[in-house]
Image (cartoon, rainbow, N blue to C red):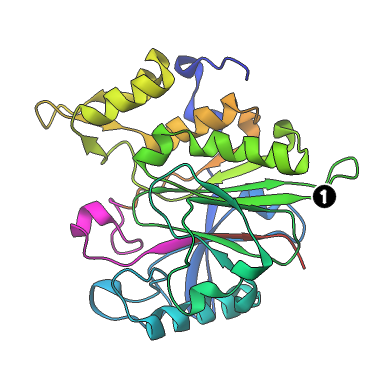
Amino acid sequence: MPAIDPYAISPSAYRGDFTTQKSRGVIYVTSNLLAEAAGLLHAFTTRHGGVSQGAQASLNLDHKKDSAANVRENHLRLAAALGYAPEAMVSTHQIHSDIIREAQAADAGLHLAGPTPYECDALVTNQPGRPLIAYAADCIPILLYVPSVAGRPAAVAAVHAGWRGTQQDIAAKTVQRLQQLYGVNPADCLAAIGPGIGGCCFSTHADVPQAMQQAFGPGVQAFIQPDNSKAGKFLVDLKAINAWRLQTAGLRPEHIALSPECTCCLPEKYWSHRFTKGERGGQAALISLPA
């Protein structure tokens, strides 16, 4: 992997243009970078457009604290709004790991009945019309797209990167899995890092910076600073760390979009685990090659 100096990285190197859209009452966000790919379907959902009530109101897509009927209806509404077959979608069952699963035909539609029986924090596929979905509520959602080049089929991935997944380098490992499975060139890959908790709000004890430094060396310190408002705590920019790791995996900086939105700063638009102290639903990141 190429050596990328984290101290030389400027946020302006990445595409920050995202668009909030509404379809059939469902509000979601798209990356202008990925929107330039003809036929590619993708979205980062918000809280709005579903049927769930209370702390899960309203477009909750996560089975943790909601009824199966509500979650199913919310998935059906999202599918209708974006225009894909809900029974074709493959979902994650996340455990804050670096497990990456190639989506299987038998996985499709399992999320409509309840949590999936397998565990993973990233999904990959090169199959057209097979939407992939990962969930988040402060953790960092990442969508990857590799166009068809030199006869190789296009491929996509949906990644959930909490701080543990980030520390385990799941974003870069997903790029490597795309290389291994489909022979893609990382330089062709496009990435959208969606709304998640920002370096403004992710205040942690020393264990998180120490874990990052153990994984990535002193360079990761470029994305960590003391939290001057809380003695002994640190502000960690997970989005920037993942963008840096994607560059290290071979992506071009101009092929990385980084959402400026912090879920903890925008609790009316997104669920934030930190803001709600865990009483929340879950939004999703979705991507699909055209059928």
Main SS, magenta residues:
loop
Spot occupied by residue 287 in the image (x, y as percentages of width and height):
62, 59
Q: Is residue 24 above or below residue 169?
A: below
Name the one closer to the observer, 73 or 127. Answer: 127
Residue at the spot of label 1: 153
Spot occupied by residue 108 in the image (x, y as percentages of width and height):
61, 71
**Bounds of the magenta span?**
264-284
**Secondary element at tag 1:** loop
Residue occupying the point 48% across, 33% down: 169
Q: Residues within 10 Å of mark 1 (few under 14, many from 20)?
A: some
Disc 1 marks which amino acid? Pro
Residue 127 in view: yes
**162 lies left or right of 147:** left
Residue occupying the point 21% across, 35% down: 204
Task: Point out the image quarter for the N terminus.
Answer: top right
Residue 12 in view: no
**142 lies left or right of 82:** left
Spot occupied by residue 34 in the image (x, y as percentages of width and height):
65, 50
Q: Quadrant of residue 220?
A: top left
Q: Is residue 228 above or below residue 70?
A: above
Residue 107 drawn in magenta: no
List the single residue furthest toward the right.
151
